[in-house]
Amino acid sequence: MDYNRLSRLVLSKRLTPIKGNFVIKNSILRSYATTAQENNKKNLVILGTGWGSISLLKKLDTRDFNVTVVSPRNYFLFTPLLPSCTVGTLETRSIIEPIRYTTKRKPNNVRYVEANCDKIDFQNNNIHIHATSGINIEPLNKTIPYDYLVVGVGAETGTFGIPGVKEHACFLKEVPHAKVIRSKLSDCLELASFKNQSPEEQKRLLHMVVVGGGPTGVEYAAELHDYLKEDLAKWYPNLVDKFSITLIEAFDRLLPAFSTKLIDYTQTTFKKNNINVLTKSKVKSVDDKKVTVETEDGIKELDYGLLVWAAGNTHKDVVKNLISEMKDAQTNPKGLSVNDHLLVNGSNNIFALGDATATQYSATAQVASQQGKYLAKVLKNVGKYSELTPSDPQNVISQTLKNTKGFEYTHYGSLAYIGSEKAVADLKVMNYNAAFGGILTYLFWRSVYLSGLFSIRNMIMVCADWSKTIFYGRDISSD
């Protein structure tokens, strides 16, 4: 072996040892964003891989910018079908699309950085990130410069400061959440099936409580009921009569965004399916075995085996920090205030969309997706103006927005699955609102969500999972 040649090769590659038996290139420590001096293009940094960010990226002409996507999650998640993953109707990999599948299809190179954004330094036009890994390496802390920034980091589940929620409840917003719920549900069933388990403990373990009467909470309760009816009776026949579901909602009705007709239909369906609905009820505290609820009839303590929290949103830390630092221009505690062009108030080059913003629109995937598509058009115009005045990006924004129409949201309707192969749909047809519910609506619900998946790969996998459930039942394993 030519050791001299080998040593020169190692030095040329600049391999550096780190903790453990791993090596990485020093090049990972350089900036991920290509500088504008290299190719006269402006640096566009996109935070997040949710509905808004991915819709933007898919429509964006990446030849106009040096694009960098920063997110700790290296995939897009089709959130409307996430409740189906908690009981084995679908597998989580069927509803995610790796971010690199999207970036690879773009006409110009798009960099992806798997990292958390800790701070947006809007005065110096850079972001502070940190990347950690399951392997034995030191945390990587970096700054990435930008000329234009898009904040699409979404939101976290809000606990409203209620004691015990964060420690004992299961959230339902990300893939790991669905896996935790699936595992805990399996644990409750297995523990309840122990031969010498007391009736009281069995009752507690088999009582599933869902907090939140929006689409996520309603659809999870519906999926749980279907699991009970179609699979639990087959695999745990001695437990099926002891299984119970309670749905807690602070307002006076479920699905407040839907028409009164569909709300009544949903609550009637839940009653037939023996799903106990507590409206006008507020959770006061939670511990590892019971949830204390303030109802119209007074304080109640509900023993539970599994508690799923699907109520409300709160900002991520990076958004909170930006609001705090821009307090003169950012006065809305509900999120980043933006103008009609999604430009953050108090900034000339930061855009925001989706759940990170405080607008007149609901925090839904439909809103974020339309905002992403709109912002792609805005940035296309920005790219054109940048070629004319490359040295002044902030002036480019002001000139672009003067000639660009503001964002207008078009509501196409709302859908929700309510169990027993029934769904509800509030649709806007020819400027008229139409309300539908039942089995045919369930088929429509499936077709809409299937067509809404971002790739043929996902469509095939979801169809395969649905077919497996029909012919073989749900996968009841904990993983």
Image: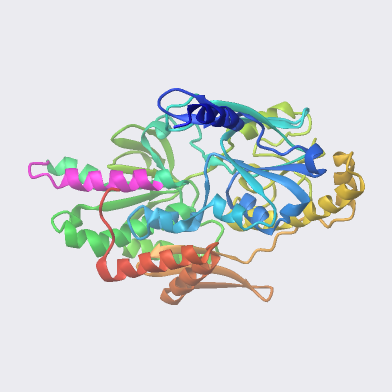
Q: Position of residue 435 (x, y in %)?
A: 54, 72
The quadrant of the picture occupied by the N terminus is top left
Q: Is residue 192 magenta?
A: yes
Q: In the picture shown, does residue 19 fall above or below 336?
A: above
Q: Is residue 52 magenta?
A: no
In front here: 257 or 393?
393
In front here: 38 or 100?
38
Q: Is residue 237 left or right of residue 466?
A: left
In front here: 458 or 43?
43
The answer to whether one can see residue 296 in this image is no
Is the stretch drawn in magenta largely helix, strand or loop?
Answer: helix
Residue at image x 61%, y 46%? 355
Q: Position of residue 329 (x, y in %)?
A: 78, 33
Residue at image x 46%, y 53%? 216
Q: Position of residue 207 (x, y in %)?
A: 27, 47
- The boundaries of the magenta stretch are 178-197
The answer to whether one can see residue 176 in this image is yes
